[in-house]
Structure formats: structure tokens, C-alpha cells
Image (cartoon, rainbow, N blue to C red):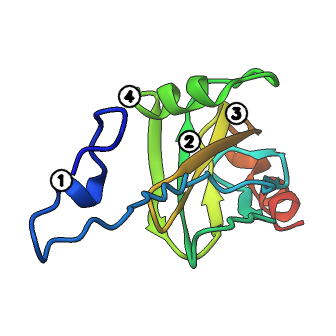
Amino acid sequence: DMAKDGARSRADLAEPGVFFAPTAAVTRVNRQPTGGVLKVSPQQGLALLTPFHVSTAGWQDEDAEELSFEFFVALNTTVPDNATAAYLSALLATTAAQRILPATRVPRVDPWLSPPGVHSLLVRVTDTWGAAVVVATAVTASGAVRVDQLPGALAQADG
């Protein structure tokens, strides 16, 4: 049947026995983990002698059951304090960044021995669905130690 204005309703267009049901698509946005920090202790030490303890903590993710952590070092590279997420992600894509620990559920690297220089340590935190964030911090490892200074340097490195 035609309505008074000439339009047909959905029910009129359906074949006998065919019914229309309204549908709705729900899209959920997967947000990246937030709120965490990357720490290194100590922040300065002796190259290849001081054990640097690297850890990350405080991460929250509303839609993920588990997080994974990948640790990197960008040798002789310092990340600016105001570095954007795009900058950090681009840095990981360069040859300057070397993975020091593949993706793991353990949020730390113990210990890590640094070559001489000022370096950036980075962690990429990824949730179950693939959303990721990268944060960075600096570490300084002073240069070579003469052989006659080695006992004192080892004692200092042990802390």
C-alpha cells in the first residue's frame, strides 16, 4: 500500500516473511597505555662496569588484560625533554635504536652494562590489542678506566 504522500514504509517493501531489524555498529577505540614512567638507576656510571637497572612502572590501560615491554637504547643520542610520541616512534625505526630486550611481560632489564657515552633508553609499552606508547630517559656512562684504576672503579660500580 502506498501512504498518502506516496512513500512506502519498510514493512511495505519487505517480502512476505522477511523482516527488517535495526542494526547498530559499536566501535571501540583502543587507547594506548598511559601513566607510566621509565627509570634507570643509577643515571650515571662507568662504561661497561656499572650495572644499570632499567625498569618501567605505573602503566594503566582500560581495555587490555596484559602489557608487553620492549627496551631499546639509542647510543650517543639524547631525546629532548619535549619529544613527541611521533618523534620517539620514528627514533625506534632508525638504526640508532638497538633492542636490548625483546618484548616481554617483565617490565625491567637487570642489569644492563652501557658503552661509554650519553644514551637514551626507551621502552615501548604495547597492550593486548596493539596500541603502544614509547617513553625515554637518559643514561650517562663515563669513558675508559685505566688498568691501575680498575680495582677502585669496580668498588665504585658495586656501590
Would you say 18 lies left or right of 82 here? left
- Cα separation, mark 4 vs mark 3, equals 23 Å
- Category of crowding for the residue at label 4, using alpha-carbon neighbours closer than 10 angstroms: few (below 14), some (14–19), many (at least 20): few
Q: Are marks 1 and 4 in contact (CB under 8 Å)?
A: no
- Category of crowding for the residue at label 2, using alpha-carbon neighbours closer than 10 angstroms: few (below 14), some (14–19), many (at least 20): many
- Cα separation, mark 2 vs mark 1, equals 64 Å
Report the residue at 21% width, 52% height from top.
Answer: 1
Q: Nearer the viewer, residue 52 or 70?
A: 70
Find residue 145 and report its image quarter.
Answer: top right
- Cα separation, mark 1 vs mark 3, equals 81 Å
Q: Along the polypeptide, which appears first: circle 3 or circle 2?
A: 2
**Nearer the viewer's eye, disc 1 or disc 3?**
1
Amino acid type at image mark 4: Thr
Report the residue at 42% width, 57% height from top.
Answer: 25
Amino acid type at image mark 1: Leu
Find residue 155 and report its image quarter.
Answer: bottom right
Q: Are marks 2 and 1 in contact (CB under 8 Å)?
A: no
Quadrant of the frame with the C terminus: bottom right
- Category of crowding for the residue at label 1, using alpha-carbon neighbours closer than 10 angstroms: few (below 14), some (14–19), many (at least 20): few
The residue identified by callout 1 is 13
Total numbered badges shown on the rendered structure? 4
The residue identified by callout 2 is 73
- Cα separation, mark 1 vs mark 4, equals 62 Å
Q: Along the polypeptide, which appears first: circle 1 or circle 3?
A: 1
Secondary structure under badge 1? helix
Would you say 100 lies left or right of 8 here? right
The residue identified by callout 4 is 95
Secondary structure under badge 3? loop
Secondary structure under badge 4? loop
Q: Along the polypeptide, which appears first: circle 1 or circle 4?
A: 1
